[in-house]
Amino acid sequence: MGFPGTWMTTSESMVYRVVPKCACSTIGQIMYYSDHGQFYDGDIHDATSGLHKWAQEDSQPLITANVKAGTSPTFTCVRNPYTRVLSSFFDKICGVQRNGKRYRGNLVPLLVQKYGIDVGGPDGTGDFDQIASFRRFMLFVRDTIRWRKPMEPDIHWSAMSGHLATFVVNGGRYDRIFWTEDFNAGMQAVLDGAETPHPVDLSAIPRFNESEGHGPKRAHPVEDYFDDLTMHLMYEVYKRDFRLFRYDFENPANKMPTGEIDLDEVHAKLGD
């Protein structure tokens, strides 16, 4: 199976396991800049050179050799499950994508028909009940993850621990896992442990939020979207994410972690 979702700088200064909706655009651009002294012109997900990616066949043997030998600092980044799934909803379900179309073609019509979700009309600009629609979306998320119906779970809302696990079970090991909520401290620690061709000043790096502007703005505080049933669904689907990455399941209003991530525990639990 190898190491899907893994990126590595061309200088092999660092290896990163991508987790969607967890600052991956910014991290990719930092990696690119650290090699080339400039940012990639466009969405880093579209880059086909200047950064090794598992999706590029010629990068696979290089990534495999590096990961198996533990040559370079290896890291990933996680995010509060409550804000991550909300972000997925507003970006991928309510929003019109960069190509001017809805995400995954017939996905949104399917959700409208089967789950009664409202997304603000064909262009996403109409008023709609965000809370009611999101709660219905959570039923769909649970159905995809628990029963793989009416479709396989999408990478943007499948559990973070599932993304991280593919790397571990195939022989990889993380040197650092940090939170988007404390991004600069976590990313700085990664850079401090890497020998990069170009120095990176994190305070001067813009945030590359490629999903910004795709969908409507969130109109309510995070906690307003989650009633008892929705929190139950969240726990059913993301229990391991809350536990391993130390997020507060009991209080959706608290986006900050409640303790340090135990890397040994992560590897033990995800390597099963």
Image: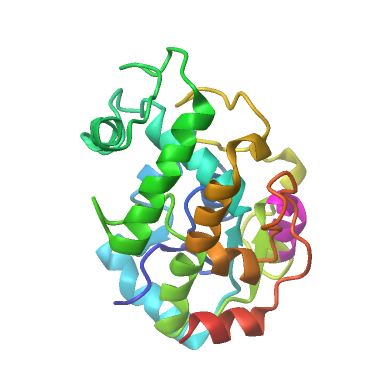
Q: Can you say which quadrant of the picture contains the N terminus?
A: bottom left
Which percent across, then down, holds residue 199?
69, 54
Q: Quadrant of residue 227?
A: top right
Instruction: Name the residue rendered at 29%, 32% in the picture.
Output: 108
Q: Nearer the viewer, residue 75 or 200?
A: 75
Instruction: Name the residue rendered at 30%, 36% in the picture.
Output: 111
Give the residue furthest to the front.
Answer: 228
Mark yes or no: residue 40 visible.
Answer: no
Residue 129 shown in magenta: no
Which percent across, then down, holds residue 186?
72, 60
Taking 63 as reference, is 265 above or below it? below
Magenta span covers which residues? 181-189
Magenta: main secondary structure equals helix
Taking 77 as reference, is 30 above or below it? above
Residue 183 shown in magenta: yes
Left or right: 142 as drawn, with respect to 181: left
